[in-house]
Amino acid sequence: MTRSGSRVLGIESSCDELAAAIVRDGVVVLASVVRGQDAVHGPYGGVVPELASRDHVAAVSQVVDAALDEAGLGLDELTGVAVTAGPGLMGSLLVGLSFAKALAFQRGLPLVGVHHLAGHLAAAELVDDALRPPYLGLVVSGGHTALYRVEADRAPALLGETRDDAVGEAFDKVAKLLGLPYPGGPVLSRAAEKGDPAAVDFPRPLAETAGLDFSYSGLKTAVAHEVARRQPLGEGDVADLAASFEAAATDVLVARARRALEQEGLGRLAVVGGVAANRRLRAELAAAAARQGFHLVFPPPSLCTDNAAMIAAAGTRLLDRGERHGWDLTASSRIALGADDLPPGSVR
Ligand code: KG4
Ligand code: ZN
């Protein structure tokens, strides 16, 4: 249990979302503000790193002010600052990190850097008291597809990860192939609701093989071939291809998660990251959990996609354990979660 009375400001700027949040006692979200950049990147069909960091610079102070306003707190009522220190786009990360450092230094507050994936996992712990380690963490986002065994006071152990594309990246690329507007994942998922998931039997790469790795590039290529074969695409084709792709992509996640639970002898599963907002994945895993009796936790969609409440929650845990980072904390664009002997969420 976290120390009572903490009010930690979290800042997240690792990609195209800029977010600030304030979490009390590690579990109560007093404010959570997320500023997206869909309008900035939409015309390019994907995130343009230079534009992302420039937009963050222009907005960071307003977003933090908005979180303080929403929480009804002044800067002098904060007890610590937590910030995403990696992985992510370097320019984007540096905006949040520099702001967090300056604020913590000026207010004499403790500062802690948080691993982005430790943040995603913390979102599940934030919403469900019953989610105690050890549990299985399935991280599914635009940059990651991985399974972790999460233990108390120990770095999460990587059990398997994607060998090529992340599942969110596959959603985004397939959406583009289908001519759907940016951002692809959620738009494709909405289009899929009107389609037949059995229209095309796309491959479920690695779903039934040994091991716990994932692969999504073959599935994306299979969709590309089908798109080429059906040109020009009508509305019905788009819906059917979206539904069939979504079914294949989520079936693999469900099969891998079930295998990992069995292999590791775990009874609790947390699914986090942007793709955890996907309705089909939520429904399929809920059905599997009901059948097999494992405890399933999905954060609400607003805590699945990038946000700062998850960073504040993960940061509170680190601060409560007495962890601090110095003013020399730097951002790491690529850093594995649990790659070393540091506690979960630590970054160096
Ligand atoms: O966690 P997140 O916000 O950022 C990263 O850390 O990557 O995840 C963003 C990813 C994107 O690829 C987006 O298309 C996907 O999550 N996503 C979805 C849905 N909502 C977001 N994919 C499928 N269905 C959704 N409803
Ligand atoms: Zn993320």
Image (spheres, rainbow, N blue to C red):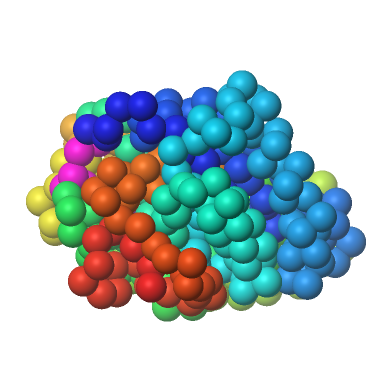
Residue at the far left: name it. 265
Residue 126 at x, y percent in the picture: 37, 34
Is 202 covered by the magenta stretch?
Answer: no
Horizontal side, residue 266 vs residue 219: left or right: left
Q: Is residue 129 above or below residue 123?
A: above
Q: Is residue 137 above or below residue 44?
A: above
Q: Compare residues 9 and 344 and report the one nearer the observer.
A: 9
Stretch in magenta? 131-137
Q: Is residue 291 visible?
A: no
Picture mark count: 0
The quadrant of the picture occupied by the C terminus is: bottom left
Is 135 covered by the magenta stretch?
Answer: yes
Q: Is residue 320 above or below residue 87?
A: above
Residue 243 at x, y percent in the picture: 61, 48
Horizontal side, residue 136 vs residue 9: left or right: left
Residue at (29%, 74%) from the top-left corner?
339
Residue 129 at x, y percent in the picture: 27, 28
Residue at (70%, 33%) from the top-left corner?
66
Residue 225 at x, y percent in the picture: 68, 74
Location of residue 194 by image quarter:
top right
Q: Compare residues 323 and 46 and report the one nearer the observer.
A: 323
Q: Compare residues 27 and 240 and report the one nearer the observer.
A: 27
Q: Is residue 148 visible?
A: yes
Residue at (42%, 66%) from the top-left corner?
326
Residue at the far top: name it. 72
Residue at (45%, 33%) from the top-left corner?
7
The quadrant of the picture occupied by the N terminus is: top left
Horizontal side, residue 159 vs residue 35: left or right: left
